[in-house]
Amino acid sequence: MTTLDTDVVVIGAGPVGLTLANLIGVRGHRATVLESRDRLIDYPRGVGLDDESIRTLSTAGLWEKVRPYTVAHHVVRLVNGKGRVLATNDPRTQEFGHARKHGFIQPLVDRELAAGLDRFPGTELRFGHRVVGLEDRGDHVAVTAERLDADGTATGTVTLTAAYAVGCEGGSSFTRKWMGVPFEGKSPSTRWVVVDVENDPIGTPSVYLGADTRRPYVSIGLPQGIRRWEFMLHDDEPTERVDDPAFMHSLLERHVPDPAALTVINQRTFTHHGRVAASFRKGRVLIAGDAAHLMPVWLGQGWNSGIRDATNLAWKLTSVLDGSADAALLDTYTEERRQHAADMIDVNMAAGAIMKMGRFGGGLRDACAAVLNLVPRWQSYFTDLRFKPMPRYAEGVVVDQATLAPGTARAGFKRGRLAPFTDSAGELSPVGLQFIQPRVSTADATDVLLDEVTGDWWTLATWGTDPTAFLSAADLALVRRHRIALVSFVPETQRAWAEQRHAGSPAPVTVVGDSTGALKNWFDTRACGLVVLRPDRFVAAASLTVQAPRTLAAVLAAGSLTTDGVPA
């Protein structure tokens, strides 16, 4: 056996790398984060945080640390050059336990992610380490980094061994280039200049997307009094022109009376990209975040898409590290994450095209928006964020609801459709979707979010019945082997009865009271009585309760979960 320096080397101390390292640490494994810079990036970049990411931060035990640097219900309004609102994006549902959209200050959030690593004795963050070599040795990897002093001069090298390496070092990723995978897509030539200022001179919260045919812009109110503007540069305007204060003042003077009085904390020029790697894994080396995909900023999904990668990858890596799953589980990472990243890129590209329309196209766009806003159904398409493709895993660690076949959930699904999957009976199938998170109560907790009582690993839950009722002794041995929490969802009015009844179950059962009716409605409209939830809270399987043994076996097969030490 090779003695390894760490379990996972994470390359890059951006939000994705730091989140991944925290999730690995929370689940009891070691991670070493290597960052070429001498400190975290201290200027704002990402500005949008969604409810899925907050659920991940909660799993990492960091949401309460991050929360002070966020503001909930970050409303987005698309306006034309005259300031008329064309569409409003203001979803108010909270399916996953939190407001759908938040504004946030990335440097302060990243700081808390980095500080979170201090909780784990086997995890560390090393600044001034630029990775220059990778070697997959079959049973482990070797990562070589140059040690850099404060001015960036190399002072020597260090080589770390680990079970796996994950490149999270951005769009120019050394790791992706080492893997040799194509980076497919396109990078439009349009450039934008971003300006962040203190002491917000406007003061209005939320976001305005200015689809101005003269010069598209973005104006964003952020926490702690920060205002961001983004302005598109025309093709005949050289990038160097943004260094001219007079030019920058000309961009800002339509928004504030005295641009010279602003306190600028960040000014940078960037180009939108829409690219995705052909594969996110090569042997023991993987990529995540911008190293795996780049997307335009319009819907604020660059940061969140990277966190989705970390969420998906972390539980799979730790499952393989602790021996509960075969390495084949890691093949599902690309399978599950790549298509959704590509879908998000397409939606962002479309949003950018709407923003950048010329005079004729802009007039047609404005007229269409006026008509669509007269129809509540179409208006809600934008207001409720229905145009955003939710992660839906059709292949990977999923079980088809109609056939209980492992590895697929394609019954009734046609590629390219964003409509919900259906099973063979035409009912809405939840397999491959993230499970809801209402507020619930148990014998030990009152009015808490569901994840707080089910935990962050596998869950087998039933509605209104004992989840052990149809499981054999061999099935229960597998449940114990894989630390699968057994949960019974019941109406809150029946919780005391269920607690008494399940006290005699052959395995511990947590009784969860559904005080809002959200869980009952979920099961009622999905035509199932049992679900198996993955550690990332996505639905791996849904079935009738009597199918519990077959469903459990299919989940074990789909997840490459081992049966070592479990009697046949």
Image (cartoon, rainbow, N blue to C red):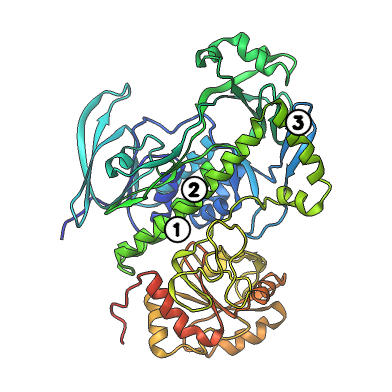
Q: Residue at x 53, y 49 (%)?
A: 343
Q: Quadrant of residue 261?
A: top right
In the depicted structure, whether residue 135 falls above or below residue 550: above
In the depicted structure, whether residue 566 falls above or below residue 37: below
Marks 1/3: CA distance? 39 Å
Marks 2/3: CA distance? 30 Å
Q: Nearer the viewer, mark 2 or mark 3?
A: 3
In the depicted structure, whether residue 72 falls above or below residue 206: below
**Residue 69: in sight, yes or no?**
no
Determine which residue is flagged by label 2: 342
- Position of 17 with respect to 222 (left or right) is left
Q: Amino acid at mark 2?
A: Ala
Marks 1/2: CA distance? 11 Å
Q: Amino acid at mark 3?
A: Gly
Q: Nearer the viewer, mark 1 or mark 2?
A: 2
In the depicted structure, whether residue 350 falls above or below residue 397: above
Q: Nearer the viewer, residue 465 or 281?
A: 281
Determine which residue is flagged by label 3: 363
Residue 72 percent location from the top left of the image: 67, 46
Q: Residue at x 38, y 80 (%)?
A: 478
Mark 1: few/some/many CA within 10 Å (<14, 14-19, 20+): many
Element marked by disc 2 = helix
Mark 3: few/some/many CA within 10 Å (<14, 14-19, 20+): some
Residues at discs 1 and 2 in contact (Cβ within 8 Å) = no
Q: Nearer the viewer, residue 62 or 212?
A: 212
Residue 392 percent location from the top left of the image: 53, 60
Q: Earlier in the sequence, mark 2 or mark 3?
A: 2
Determine which residue is flagged by label 1: 336
